Image: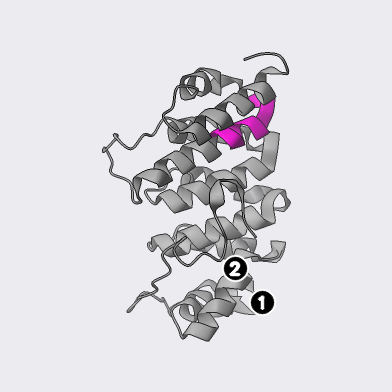
Amino acid sequence: MSTKFGRNLKGIGLCAFLFLFSGMVDGQGDSGSKPRYLGRTTEEWIGELAGGKARHGTAFDALAEPRREATPVLLEMIIHENASIRCLAAMGLWHIGSEAPEAIPSLIKAVQDRDLNTRYWAAQALGKHGPAAQAAVPALVKVLQKTFRDVDPTLEGPERYYADARAVAAESLGKIGKDAASAIPALKEALKDRSSAVREAAANALVQIEGEGKK
């Protein structure tokens, strides 16, 4: 499964899944009261991701393309200290899409993540919610305005990931539609972006927000 801008859910480099989690799986607490998906708690899923190659692949696939029932586990994962786990959670929430409106507040926070891959997938996920994600407009505008020259704070990812995040932020603003009208000035400024993908996404978003025939 892939999306626009060339991201592939099973690309090895996508979320840099080098799970070297020594001591990072929290085994404390009452596991019976914790959210579960396919019988596993969040900590158990993370343990599988940190385990052997075969188990890692199975866990990755299950969480990257989950059912709606995975939402509580993914919402715990999206605030984990490890960027790879946060990225995977954002991917899973993108896959679930509008079936999980309760994920919108967490996705708004994730779209401002220091990790650019997490930003990318959170923005993709917000776009799937359409007008219901109106509250995300200010955060998406901030992503749209974040260029590689900005170093305060320094984000995690190569220069091309900045453009990818800006482009998908513009695309998601367009999917929100007329309720994203406050983003019009930023989108018009993005028409001058040095990335052609960002310029195209901004132009398309303006048509969706303002209506056909307006630029």
Secondary structure at badge 2 equals helix
> Marks 1 and 2: which is nearer the front?
2
Query: What residue is drawn where x is 26% and y is 38%?
Result: 151
Q: Mark 2 points at which residue?
A: 63
Residue 81 in picture, x, y percent from top left: 38, 62
On whether residue 100 falls in the magenta region, the answer is: no
Residue 180 visible somewhere in the drawing: no
Which of the image's four quarters has the C terminus?
top right
Up-down relation of residue 139 to residue 10 (above or below): above
Up-down relation of residue 213 to residue 14 (above or below): above
Give the spatial CA distance, label 1 vs label 2: 10 Å
Residue 38, label in figure: 1
Secondary structure that dominates the magenta span: helix
Q: Return the residue nearer the eye: 99 or 8.
A: 8
Quadrant hosting residue 91: bottom right
Residue 27 visible somewhere in the drawing: yes
Up-down relation of residue 93 to residue 211 (above or below): below
Q: Residues within 10 Å of mark 2 (few under 14, many from 20)?
A: many
On whether residue 173 falls in the magenta region, the answer is: yes
User: Which residue is outermost to the front?
Assistant: 196
- Label whose residue precedes the other's in the sequence (1 or 2): 1
Q: Return the residue nearer the eye: 190 or 113.
A: 190
Horizontal arrangement in the rendering, residue 45 relative to residue 99 (left or right): left
Residue 92 in picture, x, y percent from top left: 60, 60
Residue 48, label in figure: none
Residue range in magenta is 170-179
Amino acid type at circle 2 is Leu
Secondary structure at badge 1 equals loop
Residue 136 in picture, x, y percent from top left: 56, 36
